Amino acid sequence: MSELVTTSREGDIGIITINNPPVNALSPSVAEGILSAVQKLVADATIKGIILIGGGRTFIAGADIKEFGKLTSGQKAFDTGLDPLLNALEDSPKPVICAIHGTALGGGLETAMACHYRVAVASAQVGQPEVKLGLIPGAGGTQRLPRLAGIAKALEMCAGGESIGAADALACGIIDEIVKGELLPGAVEFARAMIALGGPPCRTRDLNDKLGDPATNAPVFAMARDVAKRKARGLMAPFKAIEAVEAATTLPFAEGCKRERDIFRECLFSDQSKALIHVFFAEREVAKIPGITKDTPRIPIRCAAIVGAGTMGGGIAMTYANAGIPVLLKEIDQPALDRGLATIRKNYANTVRKGKLTQQQMDERLARIEPTLSFERFKEADIVVEAVFEGMALKKQVFAELDKVTRPDAILASNTSTLNIDEIASATSRPQQVIGHHFFSPANVMKLLEIVRGKQSSPSVIATSMELAKKLSKVGVLVGNCRAFVGNRMFDPYVREAQFLVEEGAKIEEVDSALTGFGMAMGPLAVLDLAGLDVGWRIRKEHRDTHAGRKPFLAEDRLCEAGNFGQKTGAGWYRYEGGGRSPNPDAERFSEEAARENKITRRSIPPEEIVEQTVYALINEGARILEEGIALRAGDIDIVYVYGYGFPAGRGGPMWYADTVGLKKVYDRICQFEQQHGKFWSPAPLLKELATSGKTFASWSASKSEPEA
Ligand code: 3H9
């Protein structure tokens, strides 16, 4: 018996415990271990019932995702490997009870459903999240779940990927009982009751009464496809999951499983699944920082303070309050404070109206935000986040003040999106306590937090920031200090090229729809309108471009000079009227003028070229950022773009996408752009090096993180 799976007994009940920390992933060895334990207990005449339970913090969180790469790279023959185990569980003549705590996800829930009964603690979660990895359940999930929970619930779970709590799982028939006290004794009691009842064990594969009929099922499938169309944004797995659930209603169980396996295989080998699995691991990899260990001291964050109650400050205060951390919110005068609080109240009320928050939760969260006009109680704060207007002089003044009014051990974080964090830190006597916490708007919604490390930011401040990000339900990515850091630095060439394309003859809506067609959440010009064109315009006025050659942002500057700052003024690249929007003819005219000034011959431009010219600009800047060490890994840049800029997760982020296209192809095209458009397109040296040596950003990053010999 492997140590990954152990057996014990409680009288005539055999207990199989899985011990594969941290999440009991169902690796082939775990599956083999459970199988041989089941065989052993079935053969033991003194055993009357069997319990399957997870050791540690959870039941099985799914198949071992690391194994998938071995299947797709041909290292291992394609075999999901779980059939013998699931058949043995279901075929057992003795009742098998699955005892669930933590999460039963993917292959974990599939294993549970092959058992005869399922009991769970009230805090347990169950789900089929495979679609989030570009997959569908591959071990009978799409065939057993509808038999237990009905078609509609199975579709919601398999195509949506969200997990559900124990109460919901009980109500829809996935589990049979919620255990009140300790899980194992509760499961033993349940097993004894089932043994006492006698009769054959309940085999999920034989339950057909929830499978419906073609007439009642048709609208349910149609609705599931409509939901997937709205939510899936170009992803194929949700539709494939629906197809597999449909097979449960038209094919006998064994054939349905075979159909499911074929679809699973098709998904597993797709670029989308590889990209989404990359995002899954990259999201976890960002937390690994050289020099930071579990022994690096963390600063306990029990109370926070925010300076500035504008859009960003208010959103940041909500983020802390949502995470249960009390927060002081400071403004300079009462009207500004009132405005900030009114916006916070309005935002919470909207969430309550949508049914995503109860009135009581809203009241509790609001009660955690304490408005103030003075620094008096800032001594209580373990962290202060500055979110005042973006200007170096003002930021330095605020930090000098914070240095006086806070405890020396408090972290001083700036929400700057572009400015030099070391210069801000120089206004204090404790640069080691200063760091950038760059939130994305709306701060209470967007998952990304760029954590900007200053030259002197201490390991403890960095480690605390990374952990705090998780507590705030954000993905924290550590970046180096340079102008605009990772996200906004790359965004600049991306939107520059989007505007050049309009000068070159593409229509405004053609540029945006090419990129939403590629999968971006919004087109670049619509994003600029939403963010406000005046932000970039003011920065450009301060830093005049004195270089020779083509001038960027000419049309946008003219829009701003005419008072068109985007959505907030009713016009920018688009005009916003009557709840809709249409391309702004002034923006088109200014672009034509810019083309004349830049001596550009206008032409129509196909969507593929629009995507190349904008996305390759992102990639080229990303390569420089990587080479300079501003981002630790290519995957970190991908996470910044997927969580902060709406880059399609199904393409893995800009750097992964570049690897997928092939760096040679990307490099050659960038060289062509350089010939065509000149100065902005010199290829990043790292891109050139990797393209010519046949390497990828991913392999380069992996080689950098290997310990030196
Ligand atoms: C599947 O089951 C297909 C089936 O249909 C069958 C096909 C035949 N495998 O997230 P955390 C690692 S597909 C391998 O930080 P948390 C993770 O990388 C799978 N490793 O913890 C990390 O490693 P490290 C369906 C896994 O408490 C560590 O565990 N299942 C797996 O915040 C801790 O993870 C899913 O999609 C795995 N399955 O969240 C569930 N899961 O420490 C995926 C985790 O080296 N997992 N790791 O960085 C999750 O959603 C979260 O991990 C979970 C815990 C909610 C479980």
Image (tube, rainbow, N blue to C red):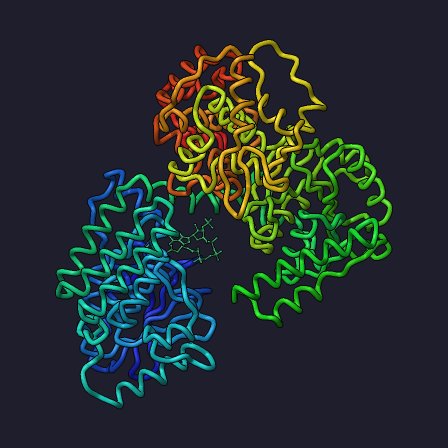
Residue 521 or 275: which is nearer the viewer?
521
Q: In the picture provided, is 326 more to the left or to the right than 513?
A: right
Residue 562 or 256: which is nearer the viewer?
562
The residue positioned 58% from the left and 29% from the top of the image is: 489
Q: In the picture provided, is 199 more to the left or to the right than 551?
A: left
Q: In the picture provided, is 170 more to the left or to the right than 624?
A: left
**Position in image of residue 701 (x %, y %):** 46, 31
Q: In the picture provided, is 81 more to the left or to the right than 421?
A: left
Is residue 207 in view? yes
The residue positioned 60% from the left and 54% from the top of the image is: 472
Is residue 3 in view? no
Residue 325 or 523: which is nearer the viewer?
523
Q: Is residue 484 above or below residue 640?
A: above
**Position in image of residue 652 (x %, y %):** 40, 39
Q: Which of the 4 image quarters holds residue 61?
A: bottom left
Ligand 1 is found in the corner quadrant, namely: bottom left
**Position in image of residue 567 (x %, y %):** 59, 41
Q: Quadrant of the N terminus?
A: bottom left
**Position in image of residue 202 (x %, y %):** 22, 78
Q: Is residue 39 above or below residue 645?
A: below
Q: Is residue 88 above or below residue 260?
A: below
Q: Which of the 4 image quarters holds residue 145?
A: bottom left
The residue positioned 83% from the left and 57% from the top of the image is: 377
Q: How many marks?
A: 0
The residue positioned 46% from the left and 75% from the top of the image is: 122
